[in-house]
């Protein structure tokens, strides 16, 4: 990716090096103006009912479906994931998510009654009202350039917000396509705007947007969080991962092997919650390793536009070099590369290709077990117990996803409870990003807050509490303050919350002050 001129950003096919297209760059100084423009369109959108906003998102789901082949090929050409993966991991999840957000979102964001069971609050009525925040900034990465931003934009829209989207600089055309799909669905022009180019992400975080949804690296996420903190506004951070896969001795081995191959190598390993570390129990380790190596060797590396390609190019030569450096470092420290590594670009192509690699003999202190790999490499450590596996899995700065593979559900759930992560999948890995009802997010350096699910919708609103008092009777704790009030409050607390054996005495002791206070409130009510 280079800027052909100061005014435009050119996007290149990572498999062929050919130009895919250009977009105009937004001068960083114009970003606040874009936010202001969206904030002028947003109030009318916020006045629509949830059902009306949902109807637009349902139409957007249909537009994605109608244009799915074209969008799939744009993703394959601009980002490099194979066509089938572009469909299964990007298109289909968003067709489903837009419908889920429209339908479930209308219920989740409806006004919600808050029960008021305390006897001294009985006359009050309360509700949570979910109000839009205004304009939300969405800053997204290149690895899932369609499904990540579109899901977040849709959550923000359902909640009544406008959006300024900053797509990754290597996938700008996909960002543009998100806006064109929404506009084809009838979403008001100008409610979702895109900004492109160097510096625009940082300026967007600094702008008057009410909140930022950031997905990307830990380092940039930290800078975004600092900018938001200075302005006392919130952010949701979806950052890096180092997902462990724990294979227990009672796992269904063929299933675990197939899961490791897909979870480790999908999107050429460039997935935040791809399998980046495997801890396998000794009794099944040999068969597991042999199966994963054989599975890795069978994967077809090639042109993402070809139907049977399973591993496309790395997004860039720099990405390949960073993977190569981690693998070289592990090999120098004694790890064994069982298969895979950099390969020549297949005939007719001109990208950075890396055949799926499996490493054994790795140790927990190697860089490859501590840093995000972001490439098709699965390092495997053999462990002697479930406890050792859990301890090693938790020995990481990251905590995005994790998986446990076992045929014993209770055992799987016990291990899941021990793992420090935002998500744990038992006998699967990472699929739930494609099911919008499931919350997505991490702990530790993997991020803050949640996207998708009801929690992702709550991230897009001001949860306003609204109460109603219909009785015109003063609250008991209002002025005047005197000894009668003090004794009545004391006795009320004992009667309501004290030991059962002491309640009668508390009521007896408090009878006079309670009666006096009751009389005072009643006289007050009559006077009004
Ligand atoms: P990145 O941090 O380099 O960039 C992410 C986005 O931030 C891009 O749009 C970029 O232009 C923008 N940006 C760059 N500098 C900025 C700044 N100072 N302020 C604001 N925005 C700025 O990340 P990347 O290389 O595009 O993506 C790969 C990373 O994303 C990996 O670490 C991966 O694990 C992570 N990721 C996490 C999730 C998740 O759900 N947790 C999902 C996908 C990717």
Image (cartoon, grey):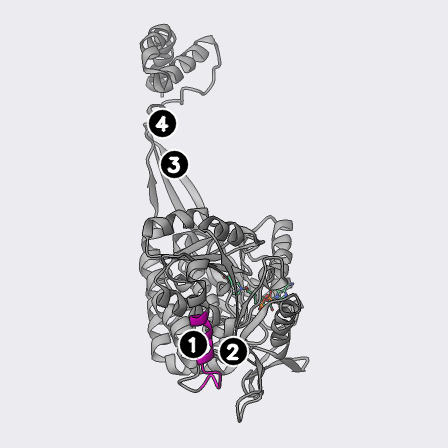
Residue 292 position within the rendered picture, expressed as x and y whole percent measured from the top left: 45, 71
487 displayed left or right of 108 = right
Select label 2 or label 4 by which is in front.
Answer: 2
Label 3, residues with CA under 10 Å away: few <14, some 14-19, many ≥20: few
User: Circle 2 sits on which residue?
Assistant: 79
Q: Secondary structure at mark 2?
A: loop
Q: Secondary structure at mark 4?
A: helix
How many marks do you count on the picture? 4
Q: Are marks 1 and 3 in contact (CB under 8 Å)?
A: no
User: Circle 1 sits on which residue?
Assistant: 86
Compute the Cα span from label 4 to label 3.
11 Å
Query: In the drawing, what numbered circle is on residue 41?
Result: none
Disc nearer the start of the sequence (2/3):
2
Select label 4 or label 3 by which is in front.
Answer: 4
Compute the Cα span from label 1 to label 3.
48 Å
Label 2, residues with CA under 10 Å away: few <14, some 14-19, many ≥20: many
- Assess whether residue 155 is covered by the magenta stretch: no
Q: Which residues are magenta?
A: 290-305
Residue placed most toward the observer, 328 or 158: 328
Q: Are marks 1 and 2 in contact (CB under 8 Å)?
A: yes
Q: Quadrant of residue 33?
A: bottom right
Q: Secondary structure at mark 3?
A: strand
User: Circle 4 sits on which residue?
Assistant: 121
Compute the Cα span from label 1 to label 4.
54 Å
Compute the Cα span from label 1 to label 2.
9 Å
């Amino acid at each position: 990716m280079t800027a052909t001129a100061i005014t435009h950003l050119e996007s290149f096919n990572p498999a062929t090096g050919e130009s895919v297209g250009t977009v105009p760059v937004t001068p960083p100084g114009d970003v606040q103006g874009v936010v202001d423009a969206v904030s002028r369109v947003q109030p009318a959108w916020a006045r629509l009912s949830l059902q009306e906003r949902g109807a637009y998102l349902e139409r957007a789901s249909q537009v994605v479906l109608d244009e799915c082949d074209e969008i799939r090929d744009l993703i394959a050409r601009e980002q490099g994931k194979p066509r089938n993966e572009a469909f299964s991991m990007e298109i289909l999840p968003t067709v489903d998510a837009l419908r889920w957000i429209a339908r479930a979102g209308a219920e989740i964001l409806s006004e919600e009654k808050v029960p008021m069971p305390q006897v001294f609050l009985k006359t009050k009525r309360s509700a949570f009202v979910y109000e839009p925040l205004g304009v939300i900034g969405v800053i997204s990465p290149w690895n899932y350039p369609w499904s990540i931003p579109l899901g977040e934009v849709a959550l923000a829209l359902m909640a009544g917000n406008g959006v300024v989207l900053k797509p990754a600089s290597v996938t700008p055309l996909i960002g543009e396509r998100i806006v064109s799909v929404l506009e084809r669905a009838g979403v008001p022009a100008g409610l979702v705007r895109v900004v492109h180019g160097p510096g625009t992400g940082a300026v967007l975080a600094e702008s008057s947007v009410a909140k930022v949804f950031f997905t990307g690296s830990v380092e940039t996420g930290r800078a975004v969080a600092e900018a938001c903190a200075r302005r006392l506004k919130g952010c949701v951070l979806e950052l890096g991962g180092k997902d462990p896969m724990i294979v227990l001795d009672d796992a269904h081995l063929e299933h675990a092997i197939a899961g490791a191959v897909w979870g480790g190598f999908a999107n050429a390993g460039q997935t935040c919650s791809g399998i980046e570390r495997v801890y396998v129990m000794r009794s099944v380790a040999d068969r597991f390793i042999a199966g994963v190596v054989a599975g890795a060797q069978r994967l077809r590396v090639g042109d993402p536009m070809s139907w049977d390609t399973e591993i496309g190019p790395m997004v860039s030569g720099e990405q390949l070099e960073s993977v190569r450096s981690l693998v070289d470092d592990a090999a120098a420290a004694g790890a064994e590369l069982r298969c895979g590594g950099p390969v020549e670009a297949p005939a007719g192509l001109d990208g950075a290709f890396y055949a799926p690699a499996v490493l054994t003999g790795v140790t927990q202190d190697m860089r490859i077990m501590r840093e995000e790999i972001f490439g098709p490499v699965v390092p495997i450590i053999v462990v002697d117990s479930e406890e050792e596996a859990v301890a090693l899995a938790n020995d990481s700065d990251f905590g995005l996803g994790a998986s446990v593979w076992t045929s014993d559900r209770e055992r799987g759930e016990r291990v899941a409870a021990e793992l420090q992560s935002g998500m744990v999948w038992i006998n699967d890995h990472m699929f739930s990003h494609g099911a919008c009802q499931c919350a997505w997010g991490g702990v530790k350096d993997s991020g803050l807050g949640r996207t998708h699910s009801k929690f992702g919708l709550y991230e897009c609103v001001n949860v306003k509490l609204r109460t109603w008092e219909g009785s015109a009777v003063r609250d008991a704790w209002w002025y005047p303050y005197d000894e009668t009030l003090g004794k009545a409050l004391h006795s009320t607390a004992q009667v309501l919350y004290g030991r059962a054996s002491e309640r009668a005495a508390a009521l007896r002791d408090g009878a006079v002050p309670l009666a006096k206070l009751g009389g005072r409130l009643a006289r007050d009510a009559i006077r009004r």
